[in-house]
Amino acid sequence: MPTTRIKLLRAPNLARLCWLAHGFSTRAPGAFNLNYSVAKSPAAVVRHRRALLGALTARRPWQLVTLRQRHTDLIRVLPLEGSDGLGRPSRERDGAAKFTGDALLTDRPGLLLAVQVADCLPILIADPARRVVAAVHAGWRGTLAGIVAKTVGRMRQEFGCRPKRMLAAFGPGIHRCCYEVGREVVEGFEAKFAYWDKLILRIAPSPSQVHWQQPLMDPAPGLPRPRPAVTSPYGEKFFLDLVEANRRQLVEAGLKAKSIWASPDCTACRTDLFFSHRAERGKTGRMMGVVGIVQR
């Protein structure tokens, strides 16, 4: 597959770093799926992944590192020293190392960290001074668990990174316009975040049917006619803003607001360009958000 046909999105703030390679894949060309578990042809996923790595840089080979994502706050720091008790990685068909968790971070050149998404947010973080990078998978459960803020904390703990000099980029994900959630999700965010009302759009019930009350006889002169009675109201709806929720967590963790870039694209609105688990009823591929330190 020619690499020139692959459509990768880049974050302007990360693109300025000459030592860093990154990108957010799309479904173009065709069905550019990068996940084996939803693939009809594993061989196609191998070709797609190789094309992705080739499109990033041809200077040195990359070791792709992926995750068996579980919507948790589990963060993996690479390279592993074997002391975290979480086991060694498995190997995927294309040679990618695969861990269990929802965030990866490293200061090792040549490792391409990847998170796989089809509505959840792929979030990439970089510290230009320490040359440390991270890739985070944030759905509503991971967001509620504070995974992006905890990743910043681990970067500080493991590598001495300072949040004020970090950069962050959000790839395409489902936006508030399309991300309807249940009351239990709303209650979880309300219990944890004081600003929960800034993250949730509530649409009040509206009538589905209107029945006119029919009087048994005409009202007496001068009396008003009966008003319509509303029956069968729709229940209220709630829409979650994943981008704002994670942006606020990063700012609270110490990042400057101007250092955070977010893609304006909603995956559920643009199924012509992105995979969307919600819009396509679970029958779709997966994209990747990837970041790595270029080997010299």
Image (cartoon, rainbow, N blue to C red):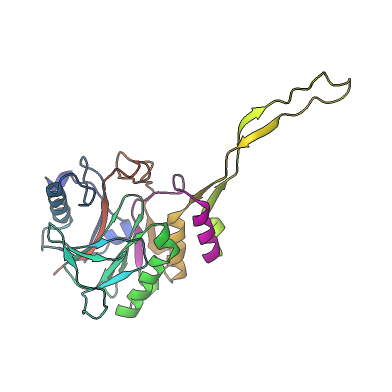
Left or right, 296 with reference to 265: left
Can you give x and y, in whole percent of width and height, for residue 294 in the image? Answer: 18, 66
Quadrant containing the C terminus in the rendered view: bottom left
Q: Quadrant of residue 191?
A: bottom right
Q: Is residue 160 visible?
A: no
Quadrant containing the N terminus in the rendered view: top left
In the rendered view, would you say 132 is above or below 58? below
Left or right, 12 with reference to 21: right
Can you give x and y, in whole percent of width and height, for residue 242 in the image? Answer: 43, 55
Question: Which residue is nearer to you in this view: 296 or 282?
Answer: 282
Q: State the residue at coordinates (19%, 68%).
A: 89
Q: State the residue at coordinates (73%, 26%).
A: 213
Left or right, 168 with reference to 185: left
Can you give x and y, in whole percent of width and height, for residue 206 in the image? Answer: 60, 38
Residue farthest front in this picture: 216
Can you give x and y, in whole percent of width and height, for residue 100 in the image? Answer: 27, 66
Question: Which residue is nearer to you in this view: 121 or 232?
Answer: 232
Q: State the residue at coordinates (43%, 56%).
A: 243
Is residue 172 one of those drawn in magenta? yes
Q: State the residue at coordinates (36%, 54%).
A: 120
Q: Quadrant of residue 110?
A: bottom left
Where does the magenta region start and end? 167-193
Is residue 2 one of those drawn in magenta? no
Q: Is residue 259 visible?
A: yes
Question: Which residue is nearer to you in this view: 38 or 53?
Answer: 38
